[in-house]
Image (tube, rainbow, N blue to C red):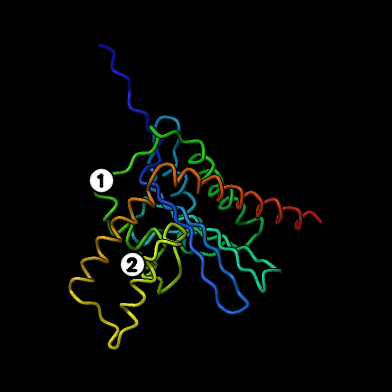
């Protein structure tokens, strides 16, 4: 019997989240990818990241030093002027020659994920409910704050009524959930976490985030050259 070797890319536990939040006159869209890096025979992603951290110590991941959190936030004012803010592990990355290697590293990882096939996605079963997910997927923010809509709206929950239901619970006098509601919120957060790590959802998100990062990089390069 021939045994087919397991495909492994050196990147695992990949999650993606798209979040929107609107205040009068300002629209914010956040596209976030979280992943664990390792070194394998073909790619030395973890080693490359640690080289960056030596040069830029503020890029260290506070929740697990093997993880990177890549985000591109767009802020639109009255649906016209738009500003893009790239972040790595919560740190804003201003466009400059000095930070170009960081942007390129982010683009490279997202591009790799966008080329994953289903068999390339590897997620540890316990990762869905881990601290790296709860506090690290939306970097340094609680995932349940987005299930309840307290901090913004997850794209996957739009139209489901889930966010509105929990928002009504929190709106009661005292701002406290019953024990039953707390259990339901926990179950919902776990279910949302699994969807945010679904290979097809992550794949689609990586294509979108990759296009945003490329557009941002091309735009800033043109400005530097002009």
Observer-nearest of 136 and 165 = 165
**In the rendered image, which residue does mark 2 sit on?**
144
Please, what secondary structure does the residue beneath circle 1 have? Answer: helix
Instruction: Please determine whether, in this image, residue 42 is positioned above or below residue 52.
Output: above
Residue 173 as seen in the image, left or right of residue 48: left
- SS type, badge 2: helix
Q: Residue at x 28, y 17 (%)?
A: 3
Q: List the single residue furthest toward the top.
A: 1
| Residue at screen point 49% across, 55% down | 70
Spot occupied by residue 194 in the image (x, y as percentages of width and height): 33, 51
Q: Quadrant of residue 160?
A: bottom left
| Residue where numbered disc 1 is placed | 125
Q: Residue at x 28, y 13 (%)?
A: 2
Name the spot of residue 105 as percent of width and height, x first.
Answer: 54, 47
Dot 1: within a 10 Å radius of its alpha carbon, few (fewer than 14), some, or many (20 or more) residues?
A: few
Instruction: Describe residue 65's horizontal placement relative to residue 31 as left or right.
Output: left
Quadrant holding the N terminus: top left
Q: Position of residue 28 (x, y in %)?
A: 56, 68
Q: Nearer the viewer, residue 78 or 159?
A: 159
* Distance CA(mark 2)–CA(mark 1): 20 Å
Spot the residue most to the right.
226
**10 Å neighbourhood of mark 2: few (<14), some, or many (≥20)?**
some
Q: Earlier in the sequence, mark 2 or mark 1?
A: 1
- Per the rendering, the mark at residue 43 is none
């Amino acid at each position: 019997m021939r045994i087919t070797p397991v495909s492994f890319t050196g990147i695992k536990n990949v999650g993606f989240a798209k979040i929107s939040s609107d205040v009068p006159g300002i629209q914010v869209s956040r596209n976030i990818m979280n992943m664990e890096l390792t070194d394998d025979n073909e790619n030395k992603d973890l080693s490359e990241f640690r080289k960056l951290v030596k040069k830029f110590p503020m890029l260290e991941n506070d929740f697990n030093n093997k993880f990177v959190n890549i985000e591109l936030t767009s802020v639109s004012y009255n649906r016209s002027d738009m500003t893009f803010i790239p972040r790595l592990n919560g740190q804003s990355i201003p466009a400059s020659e000095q930070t170009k290697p960081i942007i390129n590293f982010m683009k490279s990882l997202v591009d790799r994920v966008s080329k994953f096939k289903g068999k390339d996605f590897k997620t540890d079963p316990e990762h869905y409910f881990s601290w790296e997910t709860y506090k690290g997927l939306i970097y340094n923010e609680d995932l349940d704050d987005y299930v309840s809509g307290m901090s913004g709206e997850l794209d996957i929950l739009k139209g489901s009524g889930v966010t509105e239901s929990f928002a009504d619970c929190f709106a009661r006098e005292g701002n406290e959930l019953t024990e039953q509601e707390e259990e339901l919120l926990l179950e919902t957060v776990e279910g949302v976490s699994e969807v945010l790590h679904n290979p097809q959802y992550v794949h689609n998100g990586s294509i979108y985030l990759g296009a945003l990062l490329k557009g941002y990089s091309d735009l800033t390069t043109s400005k530097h050259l002009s």
